[in-house]
C-alpha cells in the first residue's frame, strides 16, 4: 500500500517519532526515517490517503480495541469492525476488507 510512496511514509514516521519523544519515550527510529527522506523520491501523497471509508474503518477498529481511550474522540462504537486496506488492482486503488475485530467482552 505504501509502494512508491516511501517519502511520505518517512515523513509520517518522523511525525510519529516526534510525538513519541514528546510523550517522554526514547526514540530509536528517527535516523532511519530521516535517511529515507534523502534516498527516496517524492511522488506525492497516496490517492487513498484521506479516503473516508479507509480512515473510518481504522477508527472503528481502534474503538473496538480500546473504547475507553478512543471514545474521547467521539467516534461511534459498534462492537465489531473490520479494516479496509487500499489495494492496487492493476488499474486503480480499491478498498479491500481485511481482518474483522470483535469486542471480546461482548457475549
Image: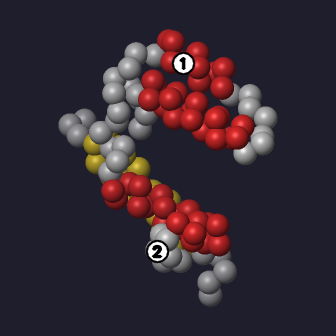
Residue 53 in the image, given as x and y percentages of width and height: 34, 58
Count neighbours of disc 2 (C-alpha within 10 A) and say few if under 14, some if 14 to 19, many if 20 or more. Answer: some
Residue identified by numbered label 1: 36
Q: Earlier in the sequence, mark 2 or mark 1?
A: 1
Residue 3 in the image, given as x and y percentages of width and height: 41, 29
Circle 1: element type: helix
Furthest residue toward top: 39
In the image, is 41 to the left or to the right of 64? left
Q: Compared with residue 105, is residue 7 higher up or lower down, i.e. above or below?
A: above
Residue identified by numbered label 2: 76
Residue at (50, 29) in percent of width and height: 11
Quick one: 21 or 99, which is closer to the camera?
21
In the rendered structure, find residue 65 and report the number of the disc placed on it.
none
Residue at (48, 58) in percent of width and height: 58
Quadrant location of the N terminus in the rendered image: top left
Cα separation between marks 2 and 1: 36 Å
Amino acid at each position: 500500500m505504501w509502494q512508491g510512496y516511501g517519502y511520505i511514509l518517512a515523513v509520517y514516521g518522523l511525525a510519529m517519532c516526534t510525538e513519541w519523544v514528546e510523550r517522554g519515550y526514547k526514540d530509536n527510529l528517527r535516523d532511519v526515517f530521516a535517511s529515507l527522506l534523502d534516498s527516496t523520491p517524492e511522488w506525492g501523497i497516496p490517492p487513498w490517503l484521506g479516503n473516508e471509508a479507509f480512515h473510518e474503518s481504522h477508527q472503528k477498529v481502534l474503538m473496538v480495541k480500546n473504547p475507553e481511550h478512543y471514545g474521547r474522540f467521539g467516534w461511534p462504537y459498534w462492537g465489531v469492525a473490520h479494516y479496509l486496506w487500499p489495494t492496487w488492482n492493476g488499474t486503480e486503488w480499491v478498498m479491500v476488507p481485511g481482518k474483522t475485530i470483535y469486542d471480546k467482552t461482548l457475549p
